[in-house]
Image (cartoon, grey):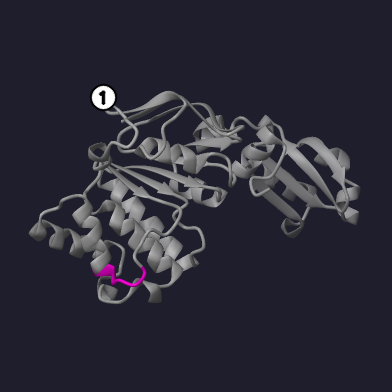
Amino acid sequence: MLQIENVSIKFGNIEALKGINLKVQKGEFFGLLGPNGAGKSTLMKIIVGYLKPDNGHVIMGNELVVYDNVNFRRKIGFVPQEISLYLELSAYQNLKIFGGFYNIPGKVLEEKITEVLKLVQLEDRKKDAVKNFSGGMKRRLNIAASILHDPELILCDEPTVGVDPQSRNAIFDMLMKLNREGKTIIYTTHYMEEAERMCPRLAIIDYGQIIAEGTLTELKKMLERQVTLKVLKTSITIEKTNELSQIGKLLELDGHYEIIPNEYFELNSKLFYYLEELGIPADIINLSRASLEDVFLSLTGRSLRD
């Protein structure tokens, strides 16, 4: 579906992207995870043809993406990070204008407007001025404007920034429905929870470089620790440090022990049975699994939100 080959671009002395290589298959929901300023938005603008890379190229299908090719953009729905709407106009008027950009015939456009307004749950607000919409409603209308022309590929650049939890869930449901219907989606975010929830396969980008790529399982396997067990220090556990060390690598920290279970205790059933046999109560035990945040921290030495 989409191939990004050795794409690089500089703005003055700043290397925004440094030899990006990615492949996205048709029908995928592919995530691009990274902190603000990592190069996510720059890459999206190159894919849609808004920016011309200094080196490398992007291929969609069998067609080379050419800078500023208006006809090619009709195959792509681009949801920018910034709200791109006419605030003084109504939702319906906005969609009429955006539909006109794609030369959608009048009758077909009316049908599409009705369809997308229903999808983004704004059909009852179609006559209202966008300036009176909440942030989440504007975001949803932004998405509606990007899919009026029934694109093959949808690029979503941080589509949930600044929205309330209800609108965020509505956006998730909407995009997943589009993906189930066969749309290929590339989704950028700096929220680890979103990437884990939405994207079966993703790439982690930092300082303009892809530092890891794969499924959630593949990325988490890069870590030494898949599971971490924390046990509070009490009179019971202090007496049983030797037994706890049988579980795996044990670190003694302020107020608790941290243990990385060995292969034998990777199964929760064996682990909890052993702890029960030791007489350690469940309410002083915490078991946590590796997250994308842990992967990012391991690869870069800093938090995703730094």
Q: How many marks?
A: 1
Judged left or right of residue 94, residue 290 is: right
Residue visible at 47% across and 49% down in the picture: 197
Left or right: 214 in relation to 263: left
Magenta residues, start to end: 87-92
Residue 94: image location, x then y, percent: 27, 64
As rendered, which of 240 and 2 lies closer to the eye?
A: 2
Majority secondary structure in the magenta region: loop
Q: Residues within 10 Å of mark 1 (few under 14, many from 20)?
A: few
Foreground pick, 106 / 226: 106
Q: Position of residue 70 (x, y in %)?
A: 26, 40
Tell me: 159 left or right of 142: right
Q: Is residue 200 visible?
A: no
Q: Position of residue 283 (x, y in %)?
A: 73, 60
Residue type at mark 1 is: Asn
Q: Is residue 88 magenta?
A: yes
Answer yes or no: is residue 138 visible.
yes
Foreground residue, 151 or 64?
A: 64
Which residue is labeled 1 in the image? 62
Q: Would you identify the image quadrant in which residue 266 lies?
A: top right
Front-lying residue, 70 or 230: 70
Residue extending farthest left? 107
As helix, strand or loop, the secondary structure at mark 1 comes to loop
Quarter of the image where one finds residue 159: bottom left
Is 183 one of the magenta-colored residues?
no
- Say which residue appears at 24% left-offset and 43% top-offset: 74
Residue 95 against residue 14 in the figure, above or below: below
Which image quarter holds the N terminus? top left
Residue 61, horizontal then vertical, whole percent? 27, 28
Against 120, residue 80 (above or below) is above
